[in-house]
Image: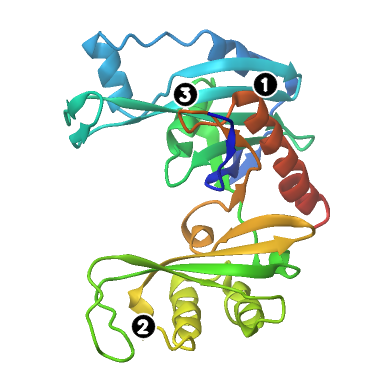
Amino acid sequence: MAPRKNEEVSASFHYLIRVKKSGDEEVEIPFTTGDFTALFTKMQSQKPFDLFLERDIERLRSHKEAPLENLELVNQRTITGTFKASYYGHGYDNSEKGRISADSVNLRPFHFVLYLAESGRIYVGSQYLGLFGGYRILRDTIKGMMPESAGVRSMSYRLGASYYKNAEPKEIRVNVANKSTSIAGRSQLGGKMMIALTRTSKEDPLVDRVKRGVIPFFGKGQREIKHAVAGLMNQSDLIELDDDDVLDCTVLADMNGKSTTIYMFDNGIRATRFKLDVSVDDDGHPSNADTCNEILNALNDHVISVIANG
């Protein structure tokens, strides 16, 4: 099977700072290239996981440490690699293996980049695949390898609505709760469902409605976003929604000559995610090299440059 594009491959960005107490205040202590190299050495010396040993399975269940692979110190400021996030706790049926028990631990690979900025902060780009990802366990793994882990803080990188001022919406996708009913009242919509509205042309009124009525609420509270999205959907004559019926919203748009995905609800609870233009293999995963390269491009284009320009 030939490699294929997957719009669900994305990355989030966070940064680590080191602080120390100075009187009643905390003072940020920049990481040095020496600290960064020492961290890489520590990552390389991670004790391997043996999936046939119960103590190592418990290490994975604790969600405090993830197996690290494909580690490379690209230069004195850049580390790339792969971490495996663990999932367990519910059983399911598999067409090849049969019943997978709730006690079994399943590992999914995700790629990452660590970048030591001139400011002395360590930026972490963590790959997602659809809803799956694991920045928290990657963060805890990295912090656990630092000698002053108690003084290390993790911050999420979030964009504001102004970043998307040039976005031209192509489609809006809204996940809706099951209590919503059709405006004509003919039937009850059972279960959670996704409704997609797609523009028919650049002059379609939907473009302006999304651009003016939804995107400006990116970065605001979920209550405001839900109200804006419900208001837009209620103009469609397709469905009648209350604010609380809106569970999630994603806008697909063209921006500066590239396709971008705006995760409206991500900004309020976690870092902004950026779509990565990569192919996936037969197992549905992107390669380490392509993914890390795209993460570095996104870091340069959307994070470091934004910070540098205020």
Residue 242 image position (x, y, % from top left)? 35, 83
Specify the farthest residue to the right. Answer: 309
Type of the residue with mark 2 = Leu
Q: Is residue 68 left or right of residue 102?
A: right
Can residue 24 be seen? no
Residue 283 image position (x, y, % from top left)? 45, 28
Type of the residue with mark 3 = Gly
Q: Which residue is mark 3?
A: 144
Type of the residue with mark 1 = Phe
Relative depth, front residue between 31 and 234: 234
| Label total for image | 3
Q: Is residue 248 above or below residue 127?
A: below
Residue at image position (76%, 45%) is 304
Residue at image position (66%, 24%) is 289
Relative depth, front residue between 297 and 115: 297
Between marks 2 and 3 in the image, the one whose residue lies nearer the viewer: 2
Mark 3, other Cα within 10 Å: few <14 / some 14–19 / many ≥20: some
Residue 61 image position (x, y, % from top left)? 28, 26
Q: Which mark is residue 241?
A: 2
Residue 23 image position (x, y, % from top left)? 59, 42
Q: Which residue is mark 1?
A: 36
Sooner in the amino-acid sequence: mark 1 or mark 2: 1
Tag 3's secondary structure?
Answer: helix
Q: Is residue 36 above or below residue 88?
A: above
